[in-house]
Each structure stands twice: as structure tokens, then as C-alpha cells.
Amino acid sequence: MKFKFTWIILLICFTVEAQSLASENLAHLYDPTDEIEVEWLMVKQSGKITVNYAITSTSNSASDEMYLMEWEKRESLSQRQGKTIQSDSMLLSSGGVRRGELAVAYTNDPWILFLKITQITTSKTWSFPFLIEKNYPVNGFVSQGDEKLFNPYLKIGQAYTFNGPTEKTQLYVYRYTQDFTSAYPPFSKNTGPADPLLLPDSSFTIANGSKLALSREGLYLVQADTMAAEGYSFRVSSGSFPKYTRIQDLVEPLVFICTKDEFSKLQQANGDKVAFDQVIMGITRDKDRAKRFMKSYYSRVELANKFFTSYKEGWKSDRGMIYIIFGLPDEIRKTSQNEIWYYKDSRTKFVFIKKGSVYDPDYYTLMRDDRFTQLWYNTIDLWRKSRF
């Protein structure tokens, strides 16, 4: 049996046609219904970058599924064949998780660490590229118990352990209370203020490896060296973030589909459910449509928070806004500095440019264009009629 399985793996390895990562559809990165979900955390320490990962199977199969996990080194996204670093098989049940880490060296020139996962039975593959570069700013991580956290948002009042470079004994923690702006529509000439230029509202020091619970909401930056553009950031939130359940939390994400008058009334509701519902009914004009609207809209808000939260909530980001209003793209392509989303029905392409900082090395901003104006208003009208 072992020989047969090994032969299947080798057959897959040698018969799957090599493909450029630049030409691969990476829409699965943000597809909550996909069979494979990969969460990761990259940390630079001691001259290496460690990729911590958790691979989860969401297959509906009653039996366990076998997957092949292959790591490759490629010089660029356009390279069709890479050098194998490591390969392994894993047997996952529905909901099963495989955790691990891979340490790689960074050089003066950036390169691509490529993870390919193949389902043995169907030969379906998933691709995950990681840019390895010398100036990667993340040099620490947050853990809870024995597990490192992959998402950049923490629960208020819960205890976490804060880790920095192993050679450092002290960490500096900065808290920011700034209420970051939500994204402007894709046709807007106004892209908003330069959010990453921040001044902290308070700061304190902790020992490296300290365990503590944070009692105040906001953005936090942890650094081992205040003179270096290195560290890691996260948001601390109350409630059920990334999901919104409280009336006061539901208001702000509606800015994309409301008129100024409607949004003002929602703000004036001050958490009152009756007043909030009256505004929603005024938008949708029907109780059933209101229910469908609330379910569809806030499921996308939750996903935007999950996928795109960084120094500000995911729904406020450019990618979060487009994801909420237009949904999961049919195709996603990556270049070294761009992420390109394609929507086939509307024949629309949105281009996001990488604008990373110490607060989020993978933050992207949208290239705005007034040609998106009509598409935006047509889609908003569909939302208001609850046709999603």
C-alpha cells in the first residue's frame, strides 16, 4: 500500500504541467467555501523568515482525504518551475487542521516561496505565494497557549503572550486610538489621508514573552527597537469581531449603500434597534428584503474583516469595500506589487497596489478611476433592492 501511494505522488509530481504563478487564478485566497483554507504568519528573526501555517480541510467528504504539500523556491512569479524545498503528505478529515512551520533564508534579492497543495484523489491544486524579502518588517508574534495567532485582531480582556526577537529582553508597546476612515468609492478622486502616518496616544514596556490581557480597544504596535521600522501590529476589539452583532457596530459599514440622510439617522439611533430597523426598512421597502439584505451584507462584512483587517478594520480597506459590494472576484492575479481582481459579468478589473508599512506589510490600495461610477451606483441600487 505504501509503495502504491508513493507511486501516485510521484505520478502527480511529474505529470502536472508547470505553471507561472503570475497566470494562476488565486481567488481561492478569499473564498470561504473552498475545500482548503490556509492561514499563515511570517516572522523574520535571526537571519531567517519562518512561515507558520495552519491548513484546514473544509471538505464535505465522509472519509479522510489525502493531500500533497510541496514547498518551492522561485525567483519570481513569472518563473514556471521552481526548486523543491520540502514536500510531505497529509491526511485530513473534514475540519481537520495541519499546523507547522518552515524556516527559509532571505537574501539581498527578493524571491518567492511557493506552497502548492494537491488533493490526491481529484488532482485539484491550490497555490499560495509568499514574497521573501530582506526588509520584511514583522519580527515578532502573539500566541495564546501553545498556538501562534494568525489573525491581526485580539479580544479585549483575554490573555495573550507577546513575543519579539529572541535576543531582546524588552518590548515597547504603542497604542493608537485613531478612528480610521473607511474606503472611498472606486471612482472617487479622494483616497483619504495617509493612514499609516500615526502618532501613538499611549505607550508602555513589557518583558519579551510577557503574558497579559489588554483592557482597551485600538491599534497596537509592538517593537523591540524603536529606531527600526520593524515590529508587528494588531487590533484589540470588544464584541464578536470579525463578526458584528451589536447595533452600534452595524452602523458604520452601511456607509457604502446609504444616502447621507439615511446614514445620519443610523448614527442618531445610538444603538436603538427599533430606530435602526426603521432606516433599513426605508432602504429596502420590504420586511423580507430587509432580512435578506442584512444577512447577505453582513456576511460579507464579516469576511472582509477576516481577510483584510490590518491597522484598520477589514471592511474599511479598499479590498474590503470591493469585496463587500461586488463579492468574491471570478479571478485574482498577482504581480510583485499588484493584486488584480476580475469580475466577468461586468467585465471589470480592479487593480490594487501594494503599499505596505510596519503596521501591515501586505496592505493594498485601489487604483481609482471615474469609469467605475456607473457600475458602482448600479450595484448599490441592487443592494438597496436586496437582489443579492
Image (cartoon, helix red, strand yellow):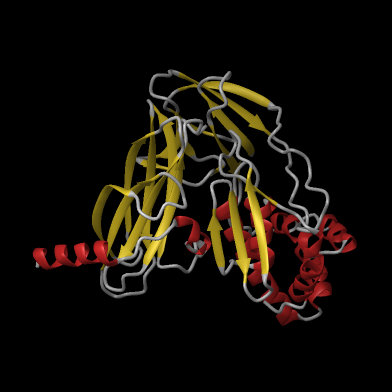
Q: How many marks?
A: 0
Give the quarter of the image for residue 233.
top right
Residue in the picture at 37% in, 52% down: 115
Evaluate whether residue 240 shows in this view.
no
Nearest the eye: 275 or 196: 196
Give the quarter of the image for residue 242.
bottom right
Relative vertical location of residue 383 with respect to residue 39 in this rendering, above or below? below
Nearest the eye: 209 or 55: 55
Relative vertical location of residue 111 with respect to residue 124 in this rendering, above or below? above
Quadrant in which the C terminus appears: bottom right
Residue in the picture at 43% in, 57% down: 20
**Residue 288 position in % (x across, y down):** 71, 81
Q: Residue furthest right?
A: 261
**Residue 42 position in % (x across, y down):** 44, 40
Quadrant in which the N terminus appears: bottom left
**Residue 283 position in % (x across, y down):** 82, 72
